[in-house]
Image: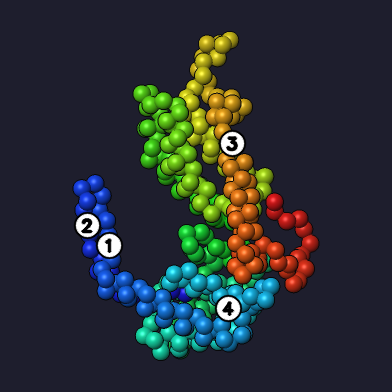
Amino acid sequence: MQWKFYESSSEQVDDGNNCLFLPSEMEQWLIRLIAWCSQYAIRKVQDNRECLELNGLHQLLVYADDVNMLEENAQTIRENTGILLEASKEIGLEVNPEKTKSMIMSRDENIVQNGNIKIGNLSFEEVEKFKYLGATVTNINDNREEIKHRMNMGNACYYSVEKLLSYSLLSRNLKVRIYKTVILPVVLYGCETWTLTLRKEHRLRVFENKVLRKIFGAKRDEVTGEWRKLHNTELHAMYSSPDIIRNIKSRRLRWAGHVARVGESRNAYRVLVGRPEEKRPLGGAEL
């Protein structure tokens, strides 16, 4: 769910090297006012107490102008959305129906969809996936779509710097640095929350090996004298850095340590240490 905002009146300042966009004093006050108003509307929903609870915490997630409500049934969603609409109207905010979506999340891929949610004169489209804070969320809570999207974005970055990676006047160390600073962060965005299977790990390794072969080039065979592609073991020996899977696991551990230190009042900590109230279905979990 997203609120509508006014057009920006920021000033553009050129310092000789970069163009900076500085919000005017009036716009700064508007941002603070809108933040206060949004908090008022959100508290109205929290006071209703008819929300999905996880470890005693109501699942109403807010980041800037994005509001995410998690409920167990469509009726509660309609009630809380109606409360939010009324509270927003009281303080002059409007919910943007074009950017507000609904989605049913279930392990059952054949679940029947309820269709668009209608509240008053507004209709909110029901979707099978949507973008939230840059990551793709699907109705079966599977990250295959997100990993595929990140790899497509990584491929786009790779082809944008492909000539640099094959440029003979650049050192290999500089090319590796380009890979680590330009391509790898795009692929690994949000990887701290990924669950990986062997198939997903294989796809990520294939992508990294493709980039490394472009960086290190071909090798002349000592027996036949012909040029050939580097084997995976040779690539990893020349790369001399943790591969992409070890990088992901390292980031996940770092994120878990950060969440463990933030304190018991934070949502992420409650999810980390909490226990599900219901039993999970039969079958192995993804690791």
Q: Residue drawn at (53%, 39%), measured in percent from left and top?
A: 207
| Residue 22's disc number | 1
Q: Identify which amino acid the numbered label 2 is placed on.
A: Val
Q: Residues within 10 Å of mark 3 (few under 14, many from 20)?
A: few
Residue at label 3?
Answer: 242
Q: Residue drawn at (59%, 48%), measured in percent from left and top?
A: 251
> Quick check: 70 left or right of 14?
right
Q: Residues within 10 Å of mark 4 (few under 14, many from 20)?
A: few
Instruction: Report the Cα–Cα distance between label 3 and label 1.
Output: 40 Å
* Looking at the image, residue 200 lies above or below residue 68: above
Instruction: Report the Cα–Cα distance between label 1 and label 2.
Output: 7 Å
* Contact, mark 3 vs mark 2 (Cβ under 8 Å): no
Q: Which callout, 1 or 2, points at the residue further toward the start of the chain? A: 2
Q: Identify which amino acid the numbered label 3 is placed on.
A: Pro
> For numbered disc 2, what is the local secondary structure?
strand
From the viewer's perspective, is the residue at label 3 or at label 4 nearer?
3
Q: Identify which amino acid the numbered label 4 is placed on.
A: Asn
Q: Which callout, 3 or 1, points at the residue further toward the start of the chain? A: 1
Residue at label 4?
Answer: 114
From the viewer's perspective, is the residue at label 3 or at label 2 nearer?
2
* Looking at the image, residue 80 lies above or below residue 256: below
Would residue 75 be visible to someone looking at this image? no
Q: Position of residue 244 (x, y in %)?
A: 57, 40
